[in-house]
Amino acid sequence: MAVRMHHSLTTTFTTFFFFPKSINKTHHIKWFSPSSRRSPTALYCTCSSQDPFVLTTPLYYVNAPPHMGSAYSTIAADAIARFQRLIGKKVIFITGTDEHGEKIATAAAAGGSTPNDHCDAISQSYRALWKDLDISYDKFIRTTDPKHEAIVEEFYSKVLANGDIYRADYEGLYCVNCEEYKDEKELLENNCCPMHLKPCVSRKEDNYFFALSKYQKKLEDILEHNPDFVQPLYRLNEVQNWLKTGLKDFSISRASVDWGIRVPNDPKQTIYVWFDALLGYISALSDDQEQPSLQTAIASGWPASLHLIGKDILRFHAVYWPAMLMSAGMSLPNTVFGHGFLTKDGMKMGKSLGNTLEPNELVQRFGPDAVRYFFLREVEFGNDGDYSEERFINIVNAHLANTIGILFLFVILEYCFYSYLTHYLHVDPFYPSSF
Ligand SMILES: [Zn+2]
């Protein structure tokens, strides 16, 4: 038991270990930008060892109730948050729900409900699942929260003032499920989206664009000089290869979508979901009692130490988001970690395949500790991992039922982890100064 546990869990924990190290490292690194050349200190990351460890899960899209993939991200983030607290860090663990966009309005209409009611219900189902899974989050942000909307508007205005937003006509192939225009080169036969396997539709709109292409060189420099910025290493390679194909400006407003935050000075358009949702990592930091503003939210803990995400949204977090932050003159997060997907019995899960794994059902049947333990142990952190009921039951029986008990098990786990760090990395994980 100890050998196997040593392999998968310590892979996860090694990652926890490296995060404080990367904070120290990036602490002195200058973000490469023309403005930083003019004013060398302007865009320095100002974090210090006293700063809280701020980690985020994705803000989950409320078109449907939580699935096992969302639960997996959150379970992993929770383990990291607990470990950081154990070594004495102040932790701000952020999660929440992303609630705007065409897909949400369509899902609400399909269910005979208003977008507001739909979002309330689904957002609540996420909270309920996190409670059942004993997730120790500190902040839960909803993108329909007025404080979030105020921060998105302020951020948009800053980027606009920096000259990075312009208006243009755009005609192209649009995937409603991705809610983005696609490059024909990346589409499958019959113009199908490679992610959703559904045909994209031709659409023409007058939109506002973000000048992402301006940030090509800066992003290349950041990735080259901050190798910890995207983890694991193979995801960094993925992002660097994508950058090599050349960045294109992207549309950040929708004329045809009503359910969203209005574009400041052009209420006929709404802000593109990603240009809205990513800001949730900052608005979550602002206190409910105070007037929401970027400045106060940033003072409460930005930049984030870690964005933990699924590999499918790597591009938004490792390319779009840092460019947006640089445009607004703000510090970048320390690390974006893209983990893998879950499969079931070796197959991709999907409603159409009829083989989804319902996290609520799993928790009701086996209890939160068994579910958390199985996915942390069985999935090598960063890679794809598989669930099979037989394996799950065997693991639960072998490790949680037939041993002295779960408390004993976690003592063993801590011991394995402690031994690993002290033996292989020559540090004492319980004395943070040795990082
Ligand atoms: Zn798609």
Image (spheres, grey):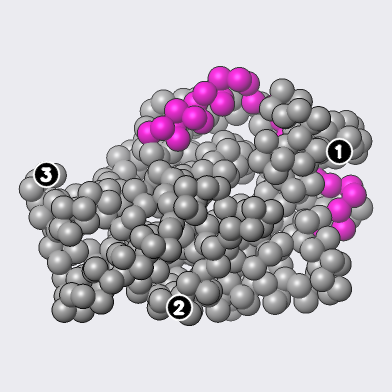
- When the figure is inspected, residue 107 is found, relative to residue 277, above or below; the finding is below
Residue indicated by mark 1: 201
Closer mark to the observer between disc 3 and disc 2: 2
On screen, residue 157 versus residue 232, left or right, reads right
5, 27: nearer the viewer? 5
Residue 389 visible to an observer of this rendering: yes
Asked which secondary structure carries label 3, the reply is helix
Q: Where is residue 321 in the image (x, y as percent from the top left)?
A: 58, 43
Q: Position of residue 142 (x, y in %)?
A: 64, 68
Q: What residue type is labelled 2?
A: Arg
Q: Is 242 one of the magenta-colored residues? A: yes
Asked which secondary structure carries label 1, the reply is strand
Closer mark to the observer between disc 1 and disc 3: 1
Disc number placed over residue 365 in the picture, else none: 2
- When the figure is inspected, residue 428 is found, relative to residue 335, above or below; the finding is below
On screen, residue 21 versus residue 300, left or right, reads left
Q: Earlier in the sequence, mark 1 or mark 2?
A: 1
Residue indicated by mark 3: 424
- When the figure is inspected, residue 243 is found, relative to residue 379, above or below; the finding is above
The magenta stretch is 233-261
Closer mark to the observer between disc 1 and disc 2: 2
Residue found at x 51% / y 31%: 239
Q: What residue type is labelled 3?
A: Tyr
Disc 2 packing (10 Å; few <14; some 14–19; many ≥20): few
